[in-house]
Image (cartoon, rainbow, N blue to C red):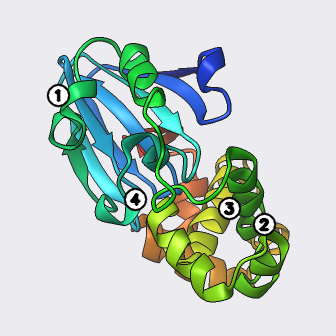
Amino acid sequence: MSYRETPAPAPLRDLAECVWVREGAGHARILPDGCMDLVQVNGAMMIAGPDTSATLSDQRTPIATGIRFRPGALPRLLGIPASELHDQRVALESVRPEAAGGSLTSVAARLMRRDTTRETTPWSTAQLRHITMRFATGATVQSVADEIGCSPRNLQRHSAAVYGYGPATLRRVLRFRQAVHLLQAGRSVADTAYTVGYADQAHLSRQVLALAGVTAGQLASGANRSTEVPSGSTTVA
């Protein structure tokens, strides 16, 4: 199985992290990362919602392609709360039938022409990226609410609609994602725990086991080749 990423097309750069292609059949453990993907397999278009724990993927087709959207970005194009899609893989035509059909980029272009709703997307793109960054670094709900001028209660409610998680789960997933990158880059478990801000190595190990279903040592091990595929980091057998 091979996997590669290319930069998102210019019109999508503010909303998407990358376009990815995975070729060859095989198994993958897909790790939660706060992102949502548009995925195309055998011509069918699917929405990969935000995951709260690892899922196992068994790709039986020669090729799968996708666009990985930044945390909180895809719901503003779909016009539905992310909380309705977490831990799910849903056919695009069941959510936005008028946007289905054609290539991934053409579908994304049609989605971008939609007028967003205040209920689903209360923040500008710049605000969204700021809030994501702040929660990724462990900021409290009160501090982020003060920065964007809303109440903690409203921030809690909007977070579920935008990200698919409340702030506590979002912080947990985003910190886990940072830890995965470091572990897969060869950093030790102890060093990763310190760098990312876990209380100690045991805390990191518990979180990895809960979110990934494998140990931190297994993620860091060279026994499996690690990549990123829909929706998030994976360990590919």
Q: Residue 134 shows which numbered tag?
A: 2
Earlier in the chain: of badge 2 and badge 3, it is 2
Local secondary structure at mark 2:
helix
Image quadrant holding the N terminus, namely top left
Q: Residue at x 37, y 43 (%)?
A: 78
Identify the residue shown where x is 39% and y is 14%: 106
Residue 103 placed where, x, y %?
Answer: 33, 12
Q: CA distance from mark 1 to mark 4?
A: 28 Å
Give the residue type that dot 4 points to: Ala
Residue 97, quarter of the rendered image: top left
- Residue wearing tag 4: 82
Give how far across and how far down residue 172 sits, in percent: 59, 74
Residues at marks 2 and 4, CA–CA distance in whole angstroms:
19 Å
Residue 60's disc is 1
Q: Which residue is mark 3?
A: 179
Asked if labels 3 and 4 touch by Cβ distance under 8 angstroms, the answer is no
- For the residue pair 136 and 106, the one nearer the viewer reads as 106
Q: Is residue 229 above or below residue 89?
A: above
